[in-house]
Amino acid sequence: MQQPKILKNFLLLLGLQASGFILPLISFPYLARTLGIEVLGIFSLVQAISIIVTVIADYGYITTGTQRVSVHRDDYIYLGKLINASLSLRLLIACLASCIGIFYLIFALPSGQVELLSLLSVLTMALLGSLNFPWFFQGIERMPQFTLILVASRVGSVILLFLLVSGPRSLSAALWINILPQLVGAIYCLYYFSKKLMWRYEIPKFSIVKEEAQNGWHFFTPTFYSIFFTQMGLVALGLYQSQAVVGGYAVMDRLAKAVASINGAVNQAVYPQAALAMSRSHAEGVQVIKKYAAIFLPFFLLVCIALAIASPLIVKLLFGQVYVKFSDALSLLAIFIFASAINTFIGVIYMTTSGRQKEYSNAVLFGTCLAMLIYFLAPKLIGYYAPVLGLISGESAILIFIVYKLLKGDKNYV
């Protein structure tokens, strides 16, 4: 009975991730051609900061929240308290992280290039992200409505981009339109909780929020390091290179991250079942993880080979000749995509469900530190190859660190 359910959940999550992959292939080429390569660089920097802040504000609930909801799915009192505590903590983090992100943009971008309205989109994105609870629906394994609503809102945002973005002066409009899915998702989550769970928001005691922060730290730190690892390369490039270089690399970065986002669907579909199996026995949990790794990893390998070979043609068809000179970055990023697929199974899923999240956190910290060194020391020497090298080196370091820890420890773990 579990196999059809996990297949259904995977297909739903894949549909959600596919909308995040396919729709940008429609909208981002339009933005690249309409905004121009330099304004696209500014757009990409603001988007990168928004993503970093939003993921920080989530505080790792995409992992720990899914796990806890899957175990207590029928206890509405527990779920209501969890929603209140997580919401309070995430809103607080969103405000703090947004202030730091906005300060960076003011410092990094020349005066007058970004309006206040554009900067406020970072704060709005983070606050709305805190009101989204995809991990709740993943935990109870009821994704259809939430998935359809998010996909529909993403389609709507693409339509609005074509209607309202007409040139470089439309930067603010492009940034705010991209917030639409977060807004729609937040409204649906609050409606569902109030109607289905009879939930009402109550400010939790500080001790409860503090306990949430402490309990979620080791789940959050891998996500925190990971988002810095995946997004800071573009941010660092903006400090050393022109907006045109940032815009050119951003196209390759966006395509690579779009393909890699399929890992998210795999993780979110497999994780609840792996967590439940691991709670029964370690051997059963490992068996579940290995079974699905054998299905998905060959698929990722074929996709990455095709991407590495055809990247110049893909970039030319989607974005135009002006971006083709950056396509070698996309070919190299195929290595990062496949390495991250492997890490999804042995790192994100296995290490966290088997109670070794602290070791995984240390591994991600190690890889992130290596990547950050390359991000900030190499751009002046090798330009946009710095974030590429950082991503590949960092992801490889994470895998090596994890494998070393597993081999050094109890061999029955693997």
Image: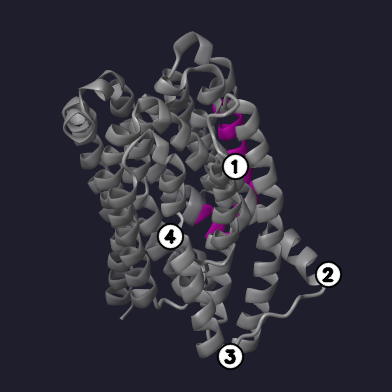
- Would you say the residues marked 1 and 3 are in contact, meaning their CB atoms lie under 8 Å apart? no
Left or right? Give the position of 351 relative to 101: left
User: How packed is label 1: few (under 14 Cα within 10 Å), some, or many (20 or more)?
Assistant: few
Residue 27 within the segment the image draws in magenta? no
* Label 1 vs label 4, nearer the camera: 1
Task: Please name the residue shown 67% across and 75% down the image.
Answer: 84
Amino acid residing under circle 4: Leu
Mark 4 sits on what residue?
180
Along the polypeptide, which appears first: circle 2 or circle 3?
A: 3
| Dot 2 and dot 3 residues touching (CB under 8 Å) | no
What percent of the width, then of the height, locates residue 173? 43, 47
**Residue 125 coordinates in the image, percent (x, y):** 54, 54
Q: Give the range drawn in magenta.
A: 350-371
Q: Mark 3 points at which residue?
A: 198
Q: Does the magenta stretch include residue 362?
A: yes
Q: How crowded is mark 3: few (under 14 residues within 10 Å), some or many (20 or more)?
A: few
Question: Mark 4, residues whose alpha carbon is within 10 Å: few (<14), some, or many (≥20)?
Answer: many
Residue 251 lies, with reference to residue 82, above or below; the image says: above
Kind of element beneath mark 4? helix
Residue, x 69% and y 45% (percent of image)?
99
Residue matched to label 2: 207
Instruction: Report the disc number at residue 116.
Output: 1
Query: Disc 1 residue type?
Result: Leu
In the rendered structure, which disc, 2 or 1, sits on the residue that comes first in sequence?
1
- Tell me how far mark 1 sits from mark 3, CA to CA: 39 Å
**Amino acid at dot 2:** Ser
Q: How many labels does the image show?
A: 4
Distance CA(mark 3)–CA(mark 4): 26 Å
